[in-house]
Image (cartoon, helix red, strand yellow):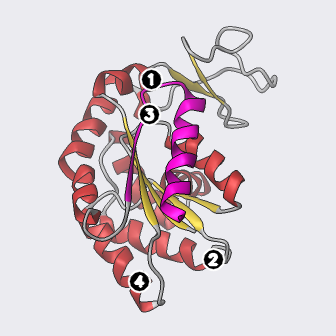
Amino acid sequence: MKLILLGPPGAGKGTQCKRIIDKYNLAHLSSGDILRAERAAGSELGKKAQRYMDSGALVPDDLIIDMMIAAIKKAPKAGYVLDGFPRTVVQAEGLDKALTAAGEEIDAIVELQVPDSAILSRMTGRRSCPVCGQVYHIVNLKPKKDGQCDKGCGALVQRKDDTPDVVDNRLKTYHAQTAAVVGYYKTKFPILAINADQEIDKVTTDVFEGLAKLAR
């Protein structure tokens, strides 16, 4: 199974993606995670991408395409979920070209839909542990001790791309560029539209039920 998971920043793609890959034994190929790992490692790609990531802008298509195609080639035969990629039509075209050359294609698109107002609340309230990566929320998922990681790692931080101004910019960028990817794929692959502005478990149930119907 080869899936693309689309949706605005903060829609819950990471959470739902983990549940999908656990159920179907797929690889999780997250462009954001890979980029942050490259930046933390101080690689050439990470250095080039850093200025875009810190401002909330999209990393140039050519960098993302090369990185994600390399990750896809290493994915297991069981398949994968592309999380955060493709974000532009140019990236989608680059992905299609690479998959066609390999004799493969995407099975379905899962689109998580959430209003901008809900996204703003979700993201600006997020806090994460810089040591273990655990994510919390000041309202919906509070740590046991205010501002401290439950695992004893130390103080929690707010990522630069979770501040109000950056979140607003990311949403504008999403609507201006990434949303067009859904239109690009409408005539190519099945699109499973999911209301992600509801309880996490209900979103998961809707995703699994939708994928089961597509598999029939």
| Residue 163 sits in quarter | top left
| Looking at the image, residue 25 lies above or below residue 119 | below
Camera-side mark, 2 or 3 = 3
Residue 104 versus residue 40 in the image, above or below: below
Residue count near mark 1 (Cα–Cα under 10 Å), binned few <14, some 14–19, many ≥20: some
Give the Cα separation between the discs numbered 4 and 1: 35 Å
Q: Please name whichever residue, 119 or 3, is drawn nearer the observer in this view of the structure.
A: 3
Q: Mark 2 sits on what residue?
A: 74
Drawn side of residue 89 relative to residue 77, left or right: left
The residue lying at 29 percent from left, 28 percent from top is 116
Q: What x and y, as percent, mark residue 190? A: 37, 62
Residue type indicated by callout 1: Arg
The residue that label 3 is drawn on is 196
Check if mark 4's residue and mark 1's residue have beta carbons within 8 Å: no
Where's the N terminus, which quadrant?
bottom right
Find numbered disc 4 in the image and state the secondary structure of the residue it sits on: helix
**In this picture, which residue range is highlighted in magenta?**
191-216
Q: Amino acid at mark 3?
A: Ala
